[in-house]
Image: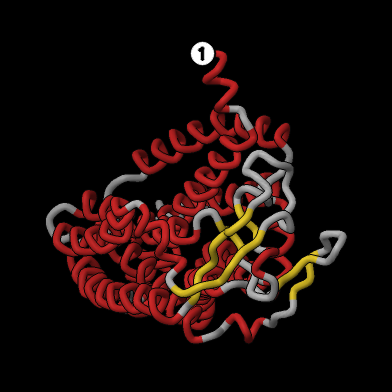
Amino acid sequence: MSDTVALLMSYETLRLIWWLFLGLLLIGFAVMDGFDLGVAVLLPVIARSDDERRVLINTIGPTWEGNQVWFVLGGGAIFAAFPLIYAAAFSGFFVALILVLFALILRPVGFDYRSKLNDPRWRSLWDSCLFIGGLVPAFLFGVAFGNLLQGVPFRYDEVLRVHYEGSFLGLLNPFALLVGAVSLSLLVMHGAVFLQLKTVETLRQRARRWQGIAALVYVASFALAGIWVAYGIDGYRIITFGGTAAPSNPLAKSVVVEAGAWFANFHARPLLWLVPAAAFAGVFAAWRLAPRRPGIAFVASATAVGATILTAGTAMFPFMLPSSLAPAHSLTLWDSTSSLLTLRWMFCMTVVFLPLIVCYTGWVFRVMRGPVTLEQVSGSNVHY
């Protein structure tokens, strides 16, 4: 037993565990906050009256703040467990992250201020803010992943100070925009499935149509992105390394950039092809099941969201932030973590508090289950 605990608490194992934890938090954010963002993007195209817009807003209004906890947890995990990733990524993506932050700020004020005045122009203004607050994060998160696969223009100097030599416009390159389309269409589809679970009649039928449109865009863009990675983007491969249990030093390795390297993990372990296959299967299952079993369709849609993120993580493993300026300075899960003591304390706290968050989230959604109807929002018992 003591040997098992010692292995679990070793530096090498904890680094891998925290890579898995970070992936879990990102997937949790994409699944739980993703349908909120998707519903906000669908707000102007599905709802055609003020009461219909209130229905859509009330499907996500009571729970969106709790869903945002996953975003906070993901950012905190990067800050504490992967400080080098945090420093380099938040420097390089600073403008994009500020735009995401401003867009996310529009969400709480949009939810809370919309119903303060019974004025069509006032409500239209905040509806637009909710739309922007859903569109910008959903798109830019995909753009960020697209740039990770291409490599980020940063390097370290001799005292490990990070230097970023890119620009915001440089992030908006064709491949990154394509991955942004993957992210946006996926979350719009996820939101449309959620609406079929939470609405009835006409709104549910419109959500069904938009689910099909978003699913087609996702399948086409995800497949095209995979082909582009295979034939148009070089991946990264470690040829010499300082060791998985060594202190974090991103300069203690040699890296080569070569065609097809992002598919090396899939070729080495063919079972990993089930991950992208699960993404396509989840989209198809969600489309088929949504009219009859929207709850199971939501699970299938969530599977597609998680499998999409896991596909990128599996392809890049063990890289987390590749450098296009100096490939040897790329950050991996083995050389960008905090100290062993920090990872141990964080692991102990996570195994206690993460299950509590999951249980509380499940309880909240159980309490709030059931569709939102026009009759309900016409009464005085709803806030939004």
Residue 111 appears in the picture as rendered = yes
Query: Which residue: 37% across, 54% down?
Result: 268
Q: Is residue 10 left or right of residue 49?
A: right
Residue 120 appears in the picture as rendered = no
- Farthest-out residue, right: 159
Quarter of the image for residue 358 reads top left
- Farthest-out residue, front: 240
Query: Which residue: 28% across, 50% down?
Result: 299
Label 1: how many Cα within 10 Å (few below 14, some 14–19, many 20+): few
Instruction: From the top left corner, tell me how far across and down residue 84 is, in percent.
Output: 72, 55
Query: Which residue: 64% across, 35% down?
Result: 11
In the image, residue 287 sits, relative to residue 119, either above or below, namely: above
Instruction: From the top left corner, tell me how far across and down residue 178 is, in percent.
Output: 43, 80
Q: Which residue is mark 1?
A: 1
Identify the colour scheme used: secondary structure
Of residues 93 and 192, the one drawn nearer to the viewer in this rendering: 93
In the image, residue 195 sits, relative to residue 126, either above or below, namely: above
Q: Amino acid at mark 1?
A: Met
